[in-house]
Image: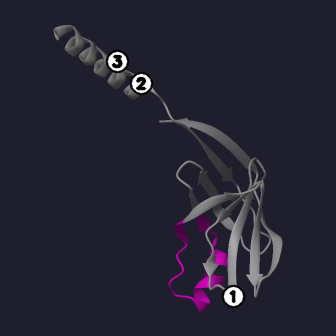
Amino acid sequence: MNKSKLSIKIFLIIFFLLSFSTSVFSKIMILTGCKNPKDSFIKNEYILDLKNSLMKRNYVFDNKTYKKYRKTDLSVKKENSIERFIYRDKNFILTDKIGYPQFFTQLVFVENSPIIQIKTVINNESGISDMSTCKKVELFDKES
């Protein structure tokens, strides 16, 4: 009986040691220096955490763009961060839908591409157009 208890203890110790030493790898895609043809930014970057299905956008408007949006919406901030859930659909990475079922928008990313597109759907009719082009795209394998 003592041999079986000893072997169970050894098994549990090995199991716990192996479980703590295993690593999980996930991809992070960072797009920086993103330019928009309509607006100007001091900083405009997107961070896509593909493991946690989360996109974070950090931006700072320049004075001209900030004043333009502030005229019609007092809640606009010069510097802001936005988080959205993301998911994969074939080769695309899409943000969650923003809007109503008959009318919504989504951001569209392609892995390792500097172009960010926006998908607009009105009554099941969709259109995709370029929204921003980024200077730098980096892919990282994050170990946790």
3 vs 2, front mark: 3
Give the residue pinned by disc 3.
14
Count the marks.
Answer: 3
Q: Which of marks 3 and 1 is nearer the N terminus?
A: 3
Is residue 112 or residue 18 the one in the foreground?
A: 18
Q: How crowded is mark 3: few (under 14 residues within 10 Å), some or many (20 or more)?
A: few
Picture quadrant of residue 107: bottom right
Q: Are marks 3 and 1 in contact (CB under 8 Å)?
A: no
Give the residue pinned by disc 1.
102
Is residue 4 or residue 65 the one in the foreground?
A: 4
Question: Seen in the image, is 118 located left or right of residue 73?
Answer: right
Up-down: is 90 above or below 67?
Answer: above
Magenta span covers which residues? 58-83
Q: Quadrant of the N terminus?
A: top left
Q: Are marks 3 and 2 in contact (CB under 8 Å)?
A: no
Task: Determine the residue positioned at 75% across, 81% down.
Answer: 121
Picture quadrant of residue 15: top left
Estimate the x, y position of residue 26 in percent, counting from the top left. Answer: 57, 41
Task: Determine the residue positioned at 69% across, 86% down.
Answer: 103
**Amino acid type at image mark 3:** Ile
